[in-house]
Image (cartoon, coloured by chain):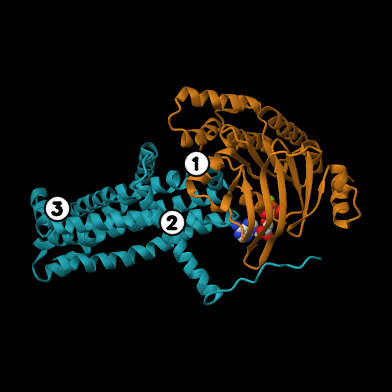
Amino acid sequence: MQTEKEIVIDIKGLYKSFGDNHVLRGVDLEVARGENVVVLGRSGTGKSVLIKIICGLLTQDEGSVIVLGEEVKNINRKQLEELRLKVGFSFQMSALYDSMTVGENIAFPLKRNFPNLSKNEVDEKVDSVLNSVSLLKSKDQYPAELSGGQKKRIGIARTLVLRPEIMLYDEPTAGLDPISSIEINALIKNIKEEFGVSSIIITHDLVCAKTTGDRLVMMFDGVVQKQGTFEEVFDSDDERIKSFYEYNFT
Amino acid sequence: MQINTVSKKKYFLSKKVDSFFAGVADAARFVGDYFTQLFKPPYEFSEILRQCYKIGVDSLPLISLTGFIIGIVFTKQSRPSLSDFGATSWLPNLIGIAVFRALAPLVTALICAGKVGSSIGAELGAMKVTEQIEAMDVSASKPYKYLVFTRVTASVFMMPLLMLYTSFVALLGSYINISANEHISISTFIANAFDKINFLDFKAAVIKATVFGFTISMVACYKGFNAIRGTEGVGKAANAAVVTSMYLIFIEELMIVQIIGWFR
Ligand SMILES: Nc1ncnc2c1ncn2[C@@H]1O[C@H](COP(=O)(O)OP(=O)(O)O)[C@@H](O)[C@H]1O
Ligand SMILES: [Mg+2]
């Protein structure tokens, strides 16, 4: 075990309800710099809600969420925007802007945040991240012309162009064929190595969890039930954890 | 099993009343944001221009046709009652007043509520349910400024222009009908049509159109931004955008007419 690693995401006692639907009920989670943490759990346990709170899209009812040293719910709009430049978010459905080409999609956050960049500089950065996800050839295509796996990669490229320190992936392999899934898993690992980012990866795909995760976190009923390496988590008598494993591998 | 320690939410009055006021506050904040953005350059001029063009192209065919037909029909239908008094020569005056004081702003606004409002509601609603707006938000790309501010501003600029255009085609339709029956020259027609119109009428019409333009786009953007998950939400947002802005347009019309009345 490494000692005294810098903690980039520190979540303590997180609660979130929507009306009478108590989604998160005391989540504790830490992510160290350069670490890939996989969050597992069945649909509706609030995994997406958890990462949306991390980047300030939703606000918790109770508990603290400290990202890169900032308490997310206490900072003002400007500070939040600065923080968001350092936190990339890959959406479950990719969320590409469908009225723009792939190139324009990726240039958009750059132009919006750095209006002083020249056309050439923007172009260079766009080409460079498109290369990282091996989709330079799709630069002038529209999202509707891309496959699910390609959309995911473009969505990831669009966040990478801002050079984030943290990446949040919401079910990166959901709905993809096995080959595209393998490509995405490789990409996630590569991003960690090439860009040195720390990540939270939400998934219920255990292949993805095993290949991309340094540490696994199992969530049930709005709390973290178990965490550790893949082997530690699945060496368990808990029926729910067992059925999770069996569903994926049998 | 662990005990749920989240305290039960307490409501001020009742759940429904509370959520109604929360909704009103939310809408007010949404509208208020526009005025905050007004003092925060840069203004995305190219995007505003693109939206202006879109609003114009979207509504021009329908407005042309409606304005023209209203001109013809209104003239035709007014003639019998005026001719009872032998006052058909007053037709141009009547049309002028009717078009500027009531028809043009209202008709333009209602058509734009249908055409522009539904298109903005559906477009932003689709972006909302596919998380595109959240994607802009988390990349600090300021979606309100890019999507809402540009559309509302474009609509505020375009609506008075479209209103003037509607007046023009309505008068044109009217003249075609009048020239076939009363054989008045175009210069007499124009002189008479504008005879009873003063600068206050013109100002009132432009103010109305500006307010309607603001309302249509603001309501549509709000409904789009608040579309709830699923494709069904997109249709609902578009529909709510049209219906809500039509209600508001009539209420605003009534209020503005009252206020203008005090200045006459
Ligand atoms: N914005 C919201 N408003 C109301 N309920 C929500 C909202 N977002 C999520 N929920 C509810 O929270 C629960 C957890 O959702 P989510 O985090 O998306 O689950 P998952 O673990 O599958 O990602 C679901 O019951 C969902 O209906
Ligand atoms: Mg989810």
| Residue identified by numbered label 3 | B179
Answer with the quarter of the image where residue B92 lies.
bottom left
Instruction: Residue A26: give x, y in percent of width and height.
Output: 71, 59
Which mark's residue is nearer the viewer, 1 or 3? Answer: 1
Q: In the image, what residue type sits under mark 3?
A: Ser
Instruction: Residue A6: give x, y in percent of width and height.
Output: 69, 39
Are dots 1 and 2 on a single chain?
A: yes
Q: Nearer the viewer, residue A40 or B150?
A: A40
What is the chain letter for disc 1? Answer: B
The residue at 37%/46% (across/down) is: B55
Ligand 1 within 8 Å of disc 2? The answer is no
Q: Is residue A84 left or right of residue B149?
A: right
| Residue identified by numbered label 1 | B141
Cα distance in 3D space between marks 1 and 2: 17 Å
Q: The cyan chain is which one?
A: B
Q: In the image, what residue type sits under mark 1?
A: Ser
Q: Is mark 3 on a helix, strand or loop?
A: helix
Cα distance in 3D space between marks 3 and 2: 50 Å
First-in-chain label (1 vs 3): 1
First-in-chain label (1 vs 2): 2
Which labelled disc corresponds to residue A210?
Answer: none
Label 3, residues with CA under 10 Å away: few <14, some 14-19, many ≥20: few
Q: The orange chain is which one?
A: A
Q: In this view, does A80 lie to the left or right of A10?
A: left
Cα distance in 3D space between marks 1 and 3: 57 Å
Q: Is mark 2 on a helix, strand or loop?
A: helix
Q: In the image, what residue type sits under mark 2?
A: Phe
Ligand 1 within 8 Å of disc 1? The answer is no
Q: Nearer the viewer, residue A143 or A90?
A: A90
